[in-house]
Amino acid sequence: MKKLANKVAVVTGASKGIGAGIARQLAAAGAAVVVNYASSREGAEKVVADITSNGGKAIAVQGSVRDEADVAKIFEETKQAFGPVDILVNNAGVYKFGAIDELSADDFHTQFDTNVLGLLLTTKKALQHFNPDGGSIINIGSVVTNIAPPGSAIYTATKGAVDAITHVLSKELGGRKIRVNSINPGMVETEGTHAAGFIGSDFEKETVRNAPLGRIGQPDDIADVAVFLASEDARWLTGETLLAGGGVR
């Protein structure tokens, strides 16, 4: 039997990149997966098609994690399609790099509203739909909290908040048999890092030079860690922030 057979997973921001990779791998491990997206319906439907064509179960559900009504809709549709939730992956996130003298209040609110408030709203609503037997919440942080690159003050602050929330909720939710952990990726090749100009840049070259494993990550490198954390193999792990950056720290 597959290690996530009969489990139900919700992955936010799963229409592309790391979220899409996690959704596919959770489904391959046997979970029924809700592929959440904010705006890229085409991308989410492609992820669903990939999963179902390989014999898995998945649906795409639109909703912004910044909007409480949207978040409620995500879990209502999850309940109608698959039943109680066993796994939540808080992957939805945005980033914008820039020097301190370039940042604006809008930059702050955009990143904090998605990366921090969105995670909190989604987790709060998910708890109303979680399986009474417990389960796993997986937050997607970043190694930026360790390496603190210049120009990342707001983004790094949001991911520092994710680390702190992970530690707090692991203690708060342990009594409900819900484990809470964070995966903190390094640079990963995705549509987003291509669009932002990171791939092929000096920053990527410097990252590769400093990486003990000599490359940047791929979505499946992160997705396989998510499957582990979602499964009984990680039954004794909670409150952990797992660095997944090929040794970059």
Image: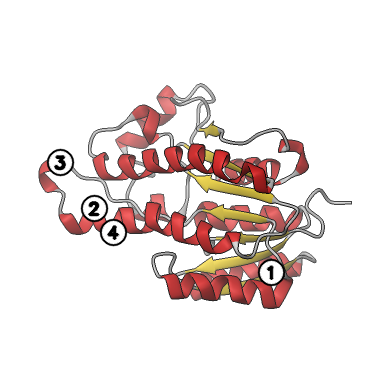
Above or below, 88 against 69 in this view is: above
* N-term-proximal mark, 4 vs 3: 3
What residue does disc 2 label?
A: 108
Q: Secondary structure at mark 4?
A: helix
Name the amino acid type tagged 4: Thr
**CB atoms of marks 4 and 2 within 8 Å:** yes
Tell me where residue 51 sits by quadrant: bottom right
What residue does disc 3 label?
A: 100
Q: Secondary structure at mark 2?
A: helix
Q: Residue at x 50, y 37 (%)?
A: 167
What residue does disc 1 label?
A: 58
Of discs 2 and 3, which sits in the foreground? 2
Q: Residue at x 17, y 55 (%)?
A: 105
Name the amino acid type tagged 2: Phe
Q: Nearer the viewer, residue 90 or 46?
A: 90
**CB atoms of marks 1 and 3 within 8 Å:** no
Is 5 positioned to the left or the right of 188 in the image?
right
